[in-house]
Image (spheres, rainbow, N blue to C red):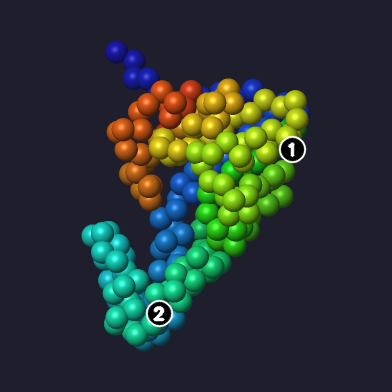
Amino acid sequence: MTMKSWSATIKVSSDSTIVFDLDDTLYKEIDFLKSAYLEIAQDLDENEWKLLYIQMFSLYRNGQNVFEFLSKKYEVDIDYLLSRYRNHFPKIKLSEGALTLLETIKKKNGKIAIITDGRSITQRNKINALGITNYLDTVLISEELGFSKPSKQAFNKLENIHKNCSFTYVADNLKKDFIAPNALNWDSIYLIDDGLNIHVSQIDSLNPNNLAKKYVSSLNQIRII
């Protein structure tokens, strides 16, 4: 029996817009969390920051409230900790295959967009840290729009920006990511959770309206033609 593999093909031209989610799609969101925890640990305890970081991550992995622990131990306001977490400039990197994928789309004269939920400064810091600004034609962030997925608002807006294009959405969350693009008859690719995703796709997400049309386990399994 021949082992089958995950794969997806996208035909790209100047009339194509390939749209990506950001968190756990173009990079691993757990790396943003680690980056923020490290900065906070160094800020709170310059002598024992390594041990504090280890403790913070252990608490997180065990489902404990990390910021509540820090607030009590170091007598700092939780809002301050949240601000440091959300507003720091992260040390993160693109997932395997992401840069090659972006470069190949551009070589085919395709357009690239991001539709992402989150705060403006947080998401734009991530994009800048990843060094992909020059590849992007459009970035739509929920806080700036006033709507988050599964709302169709961002997707409709993108269709109005890139008129007469075909659209493909690449994302990782079955609960909310594909409802709008499915309703608009976009092509779609689900990047399967590798066990490191911050938000886990629940089994009750396996409603036909939630599912993508294609599936890959890595971005380097997406072939551009």
**Kind of residue indicated by mark 2:** Asp
- Judged from the image, the secondary structure of the residue bearing numbered disc 2 is loop
Q: Residue at x 41, y 63 (%)?
A: 34
Q: Earlier in the sequence, mark 1 or mark 2?
A: 2
**Kind of residue indicated by mark 1:** Ile
- In the image, farthest residue toward the left: 62
Q: Are marks 1 and 2 in contact (CB under 8 Å)?
A: no
- Residue 24 position in % (x across, y down): 46, 46
| Residue 161 quadrant | top right
- Any mark on residue 77, and which? 2
Instruction: Count neighbours of disc 1 (C-alpha within 10 A) and say few if under 14, some if 14 to 19, many if 20 or more.
Output: few
Label count reads 2
Q: Residue at x 59, y 51 (%)?
A: 146
User: In the figure, 183 relative to 194: above or below?
Assistant: above
Q: CA distance from mark 1 to mark 2?
A: 42 Å
Q: Residue at x 33, y 84 (%)?
A: 74
- Residue 31 position in % (x across, y down): 44, 57
User: In the figure, 35 relative to 47: above or below?
Assistant: above
Q: Nearer the viewer, residue 163 or 17?
A: 163
- Residue 76 position in % (x across, y down): 39, 82
Q: Residue at x 34, y 85 (%)?
A: 75
Q: Which residue is mark 1?
A: 161
Report if residue 192 is visible in the image: yes
Report if residue 15 is visible in the image: no
| Residue 100 quadrant | top right
